[in-house]
Amino acid sequence: MFRAEPVPAARVLNEARALVRPALEETVAGLHPWLAEMAAYSFGWGEGAEAGGKGVRQALALLGARAAGADAAAGVRGAVAVELVHAFSLLHDDIMDGDETRRRRPALWKAYGTGPAVLAGDALFALAVATLAEVPGGVRLLSGTLADLMRGQADDLLFASRPWTGPEAVTPAEYRVMAEGKTGALLGCSLALGALLGGAPRPMAEALDRVGRHAGVAFQLADDVLGVWGRPEVTGKPAGGDLREGKRTYPVLSALASPEGGRLRGLLGAPDRTAEAAALIDAAGGRAAALSEARAHMAAARALLDGLPLEPGAAAELNALLECLADRER
């Protein structure tokens, strides 16, 4: 399935999807038919539907197994588990954030109702845990990841109630902790699960978990940039959505700390002034600061990888995949 020489990240992702999807469909089919229908909708399966996300997490799980010297197929069970958790988190995120669209069509809670969407998310959560029930250390690793994910999500929601400036304002350090939990924990878990399934020693799995966490912070920073300046026709989300919602994202936090912070404060949360706010954040260095921070976390991830005795072909593919996480348009 995977080649030893470096390959484009898109090929790594496509090959991972081809290997994981049959197992993921088989696992989802074990749910109650209505829940399975909603799960299929959330994954973008079915005629006329836009395909689901890139599948970064499932690819990381397979590469974790490959990095340990095993065949990619050894990581499929871990890939299925992390895809289920990711889908669960997106279903609940859309409800909490009030996002009505995902991948250019109604979010699940808009298509089926809030109650059914919550239930579908819970079912995916439970199915992920069941998938790893017979993997030594698997449920323990996933449980710790879920705890970190919930803490990160809680912080993200609570940030909205804090002032933009002053001693109670959200700090960049708090943001990084939130991003590691909300996004980095599952990326790290993906690599670590794959490594465990591939027979890696625990220290290697733990190091790969740290690689994924750094990559996750970079991924979240890139997401922040897209939340302000992303193109709706590419991202599938309205332009400036994060600004209208008043989200405490890294570009905004950075710009508020600049000399332009006072002017910016008067624009945040004003639905009719998002374009003006976005331009001011950019001029104040918010976008540049977020991209610089993302590059720093990717450098930390690569430094960790360089210190591990990984299978060479998998290491090259992993580097290619990580490279695209912080440099993306959707």
Image: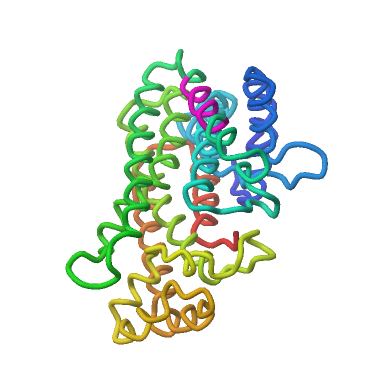
Residue 180 pos. (x, y %): 35, 49
Where is the C terminus found, in terms of image quarters? bottom right
Residue 97 pos. (x, y %): 48, 52
Near-viewer residue (13 or 8): 13
Near-viewer residue (261 or 4): 261
Q: Is residue 60 left or right of residue 298?
A: right
Where is the N terminus found, in terms of image quarters? top right
Looking at this view, name the residue that lies furthest to the top.
134
How was the colour assigned to the protein in this rendering? rainbow
Residue at x 53% of width, y 43% of height:
90
Residue 328 pos. (x, y %): 57, 61
The residue stretch that appears in magenta: 120-129
Residue at x 69% of width, y 37% of height:
41
Examine the structure image and report whether residue 125 is included in the region drawn in magenta. Answer: yes
Looking at this view, name the residue that lies furthest to the right.
47
Residue 13 pos. (x, y %): 63, 44
| In the image, residue 304 above or below residue 143 | below
Looking at this view, name the residue that lies furthest to the left.
167
The prevailing secondary structure element of the residues shown in magenta is: helix
Count every numbered label the image shows and give the total.
0
Q: In which image quadrant can residue 234 be found?
A: bottom right
Residue at x 54% of width, y 80% of height:
275
Q: Is residue 184 left or right of residue 121?
A: left
Examine the structure image and report whether residue 268 is included in the region drawn in magenta. Answer: no
| In the image, residue 23 above or below residue 299 | above
